[in-house]
Amino acid sequence: MATSISLVLSCRHRLQVAACIFFLSSALVVPRANSAPKLAAQFGVVTLGTLNNPGSSAVVRRVNSLGEAVGGFKNGNRRQSSAAFIISLAGGLDEITDQQNTDFSALYGINDTGEVAGAINGPTSILPFRAIRHTNFADLPLLNQDTGGAAYGINEKGEVVGFSSGTDGVRAVWWTRKGDVTALPSLSGFTTTKAVAINKEGDIVGYAGEANKVAVLWPNKGSIISLDNLLTYTSSQAESISDSGDIVGYATAFDEKAVRLRAVLWPVGSNTPRDLGTLPGGSTSRARDVDTNGVVVGTSDSNVGNRAFIWTAETGIRDLNSLSTNPAIILIDALSINKQGTILAIGISTSDLPSGDSKDVEEHELPRQIVLLTPLN
């Protein structure tokens, strides 16, 4: 049975940022071979829960191989607080926090052993933590004299990545399984670096900068490498790295009247991006995640509104709705893909659309469905 969630999320990063960052650079990692992906003919659709507070912003981020998804939501029982959560068919909805009266907490990463990483508002700033479902909530330490930070990614070894912030700036960091924190090398000329994802090999991706970002890679937690951007685009950000070493994210162009995003793939062993395009009629797309076979998921606008997409080198970009067995749910964003090819997505029920109109559904203040799409062959 689907879980109903009243969600109003207010993420207030109360961080003091200063500038003092140094840099290192190195060659790219040795390529690891990818196998050719076989795209499923169809995906079965299961609803995990409903974000039923119209107009609220959701934090729903990752899914592991057990079908457990993580994020954060606003409690609906008059408490002015939010709670990090794990949601799955088998376990239902669990809040993961040690401070039930905090005004913000969210989970951003989960591994296949059920360990999670996230952030929670403390007395003066947002703070990183790691936990295991039901047990062992643990604050993660910051760099010396820093006052805030967040944990964004976790791998199968329990290594966590994120950032630590204080008078020395915003610095990308990683935490060992024991919880020891280490600063990652920074990029010259930038006052901010953040690490957002780590694979089982210990390769880390993230970005440097604030307004104009540069996607970066730390191979095996080592020297920093800046990833090339698409031509005519001025900013880029890495969102995820697979265990095979493929990196996905997006490039940004600041036009006179609009900001355009374009989904990109940096193949293993290369810092040259591949433009993944958009769905028909679209001008903006964003890659969220990539699996070990090079299958990419994300979101794109189109001639019928925002839609979740799936991409492979063989098929190119495709509307994920065309592969869904449940046309009653319009899939607008694909957030994560696990080792089995199961996809975590956000959708809108056609029954909630005014007059049955399916165009521009992302602009309507409608309940959203948290769904899992499982390949049927």
Image (tube, helix red, strand yellow):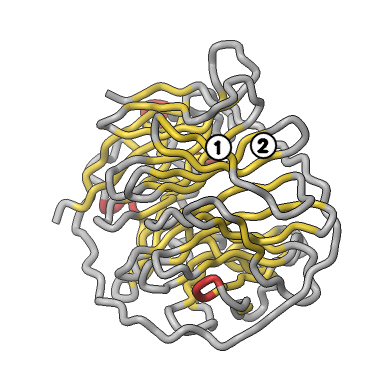
Q: Residue furthest left?
A: 377
Upstream in sequence: badge 1 or badge 2:
2
Residue 322 falls left or right of residue 248: left
Residue 163: percent from left, percent from top:
65, 55
Location of residue 40 by image quarter: bottom left
Closest to the observer, 265 or 168 = 168
Location of mark 1 (residue): 106
Q: Residue at x 67, y 72 (%)?
A: 185
Q: Which residue was labeled with disc 2?
A: 11
Q: Are marks 1 and 2 in contact (CB under 8 Å)?
A: yes
Q: Position of residue 23 (x, y in %)?
A: 73, 77
Q: Amino acid at mark 2?
A: Cys
The disc at residue 5 is: none
Q: Secondary structure at mark 2?
A: loop
Residue under the image location 39 percent in, 41 percent down: 69
Q: Position of residue 181 (x, y in %)?
A: 61, 56
